[in-house]
Image (cartoon, grey):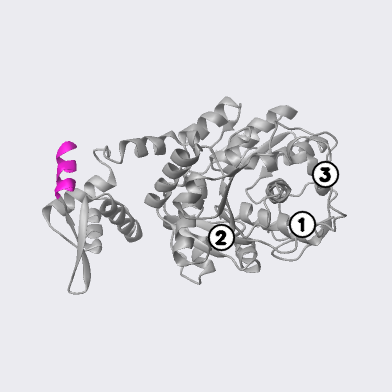
C-alpha cells in the first residue's frame, strides 16, 4: 500500500499520516493490490476494513455507511425510466456522505496522537470533523469558506468546533476536501452499491465540488474491477451548478470563468482540488459532465421530497436536475439501471427551503433581483446595459451573474425577453411590476 502524488509522481509507503505531497503539495491517493473481495462482520463502512490503510489501532464510528439504496417508483415513472435508484447519504450521522471518510481519518489520527484538527472548509466537512473529533477528545478549528448554510454553522458550534479567522498554531493535522483518507471512506459507496445486488449499474450521477466524491466513487469501482467483483465500470456523470462549474467547463474545453455564489453552496468551489482526477475518472468511464441552474436544482429538491420523501440540500438535488438533462440529450436510456447520489440532508440549508416554500415571491426589498427589476421598470434593455446601470449605482457584480439573475427572473415570469437587432432585450412583465410595488 503506497501514497502516490497525482501531480509530481511522488511515491511512498503508507506508514504515516500525509495530507498532501511533501514535495509539491499535490493530492495524494492511496493505492494497493487487493486480495479477493470479502467483508467482515462489522457495522457500516468498517465491514470493508481490510481495504483501508492499516494505520489505525481502534475504530471510531458514529454509525456511518450502509445507507439505503432506494428503488424509486414515482420518480422513475416521472422520468419514464425502467430502474432508478437513489443512494440516500442524508442518513449518515451528521447528514452527509463525508462522515464515511471522517470515521477513517479520525481512527487513524487517534493512533498517531493528533492533538488538534484545522480545516478550511465549507459546512459539511467542518461539521463532520467537529462531530467525530469529539470521539478522540480532540478539538477542531475551522476557518470557514464563505458562504455557509446557517444550519451547518449551528452544527459545527454545537459539536464543539471553534471558528477561527486565521491559521491556528501548530501542531495540527490539516484537513482538506482532497484528503487521501477521506477518499478511502468515500469509495465505500461503490462497494455498497455493488453489494446491494441491483444488477449491473449502467450509470451513476454525482454532484461535484472539489471533485473528491466523484473520484472516490470511480476509485471504488476500479478496485472492484481489479478484484473481479464486477466486469465493467459504470458510466459516471458529474454535475455542477452553472454559476460555478470549473470542472464541467474544463472537461468540455471551455474557458473557466470566475466562480460565483449559487444556491448549491457545497459544490460552488471555484478552485476544485481534485479537478484533474475527476475529469480523468469521467473520461475513463465514457461518462460526461453537465451544468444545471438554480431553478433546475430547486425542481430537483421538490421532486425528491414529494415523490420519494427524501429532503436533500441543493447540492444533493443537482443529480436529479442532471438526470433530466442527460435523458433529454439521449445519453441515458430508459431501460438502464441508473443511480443518483443524494449527498446531504435538506435541513442543513433552511434558507433554501424557505425560498422554495415562498415560491420566490418574497424577495428581499434590496436584493439584487429587485434592483434589476427596478432598472427594467424604467426601460427595457440588454443585460450589458443592466450591468452598467447597476455599476453606476455602486453595485459590484459580474456580467455572468447578471445573465443568471435575468434568466431566473424570466423563468419565474417577472421579466420576458425578445430579440431586437440581433440582441436579446429584457423587459418587465405585469407580474414583475406587481412584485416591485409589493416591496415598497
| Residue at (44, 47) in percent of width and height | 300
Residue 235 point in image, percent of width and height: 62, 63
**Of the image marks 3 and 1, the number of the one nearer the N terminus:** 3
> In the figure, residue 72 lies in which quadrant?
top right
Kind of element beneath mark 2? loop
Majority secondary structure of magenta residues: helix
The reply to whether dot 2 and dot 1 touch (C-beta < 8 Å) is: no
* The one of 168 and 391 positioned closer to us in this rendering: 391
Q: Nearer the viewer, residue 171 or 133?
A: 133
Q: Position of residue 137 (x, y in %)?
A: 72, 27
Q: Please provide percent x and percent y for residue 59.
A: 80, 34
In what element is the residue under mark 3?
Answer: loop
Tell me where residue 236 appears, x and y as whole percent. 60, 60
Q: Tell me which label, 3 or 2, sits earlier in the chain.
A: 3
Say which mark, if any, is on residue 39: 3
Disc 1 element: helix
Residue stretch rendered in magenta on the structure: 430-440
The residue positioned farthest toward the left in the image shown: 378
The residue that disc 2 covers is 335
Pointer 2 local density, CA inside 10 Å: few below 14, some 14–19, many at least 20: few
**Alpha-carbon span between mark 2 and mark 1:** 24 Å
Mark linked to residue 224: 1
Q: Is 364 drawn above or below residue 294 in the view shown?
A: above
Amino acid at each position: 500500500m503506497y501514497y502516490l502524488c497525482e501531480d509530481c509522481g511522488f511515491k511512498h509507503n503508507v506508514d504515516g499520516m500525509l495530507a498532501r505531497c511533501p514535495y509539491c503539495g499535490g493530492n495524494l491517493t492511496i493505492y494497493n493490490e487487493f486480495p479477493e473481495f470479502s467483508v467482515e462482520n462489522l457495522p457500516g463502512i468498517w465491514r470493508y476494513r481490510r481495504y483501508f490503510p492499516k494505520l489505525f489501532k481502534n475504530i471510531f464510528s458514529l454509525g456511518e455507511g450502509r445507507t439505503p439504496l432506494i428503488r424509486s417508483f414515482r420518480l422513475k415513472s416521472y422520468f419514464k425510466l425502467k430502474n432508478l435508484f437513489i443512494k440516500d447519504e442524508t442518513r449518515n450521522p451528521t447528514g452527509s456522505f463525508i462522515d464515511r471518510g471522517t470515521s477513517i481519518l479520525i481512527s487513524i489520527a487517534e493512533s498517531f496522537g493528533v492533538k488538534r484538527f484545522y480545516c478550511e472548509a465549507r459546512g459539511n466537512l467542518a461539521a463532520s470533523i467537529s462531530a467525530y473529533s469529539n470521539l478522540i477528545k480532540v478539538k477542531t478549528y475551522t476557518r470557514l469558506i464563505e458562504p455557509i448554510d446557517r444550519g451547518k454553522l449551528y452544527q459545527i458550534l454545537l459539536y464543539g468546533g471553534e471558528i477561527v479567522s486565521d491559521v491556528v498554531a501548530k501542531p495540527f493535522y490539516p484537513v482538506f476536501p482532497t484528503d487521501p483518507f477521506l477518499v478511502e471512506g468515500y469509495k465505500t459507496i461503490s462497494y455498497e452499491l455493488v453489494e446491494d445486488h441491483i444488477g449491473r449499474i449502467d450509470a451513476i450521477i454525482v454532484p461535484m465540488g472539489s471533485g473528491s466524491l466523484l473520484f472516490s466513487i470511480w476509485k471504488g469501482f476500479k478496485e472492484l474491477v481489479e478484484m473481479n467483483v464486477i466486469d465493467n465500470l459504470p458510466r459516471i456523470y458529474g454535475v455542477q451548478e452553472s454559476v460555478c462549474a470549473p470542472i464541467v467547463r474544463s472537461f468540455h474545453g471551455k474557458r473557466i470563468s470566475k466562480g460565483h455564489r449559487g444556491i448549491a453552496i457545497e459544490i460552488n468551489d471555484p478552485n476544485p482540488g481534485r479537478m484533474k482526477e475527476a475529469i480523468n475518472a469521467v473520461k475513463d468511464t465514457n461518462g460526461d459532465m453537465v451544468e444545471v441552474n438554480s431553478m433546475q436544482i430547486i425542481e430537483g429538491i421538490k421532486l425528491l421530497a414529494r415523490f420519494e420523501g427524501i429532503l436533500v440540500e441543493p447540492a444533493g438535488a443537482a443529480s436529479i436536475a442532471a438526470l433530466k438533462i442527460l435523458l433529454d440529450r439521449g445519453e441515458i436510456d430508459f431501460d438502464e439501471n441508473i443511480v443518483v447520489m443524494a449527498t446531504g440532508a435538506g435541513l442543513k440549508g433552511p434558507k433554501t427551503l424557505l425560498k422554495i416554500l415562498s415560491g420566490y415571491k418574497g424577495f428581499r426589498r434590496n436584493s439584487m433581483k429587485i434592483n434589476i427589476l427596478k432598472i427594467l421598470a424604467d426601460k427595457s434593455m440588454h443585460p450589458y446595459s443592466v450591468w452598467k446601470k447597476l455599476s453606476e449605482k455602486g453595485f459590484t457584480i459580474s456580467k455572468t451573474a447578471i445573465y443568471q439573475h435575468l434568466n431566473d427572473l424570466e423563468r419565474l415570469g417577472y421579466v420576458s425577453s425578445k430579440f431586437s437587432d440581433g440582441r436579446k432585450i429584457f423587459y418587465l412583465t405585469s407580474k414583475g411590476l406587481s412584485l416591485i410595488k409589493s416591496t415598497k
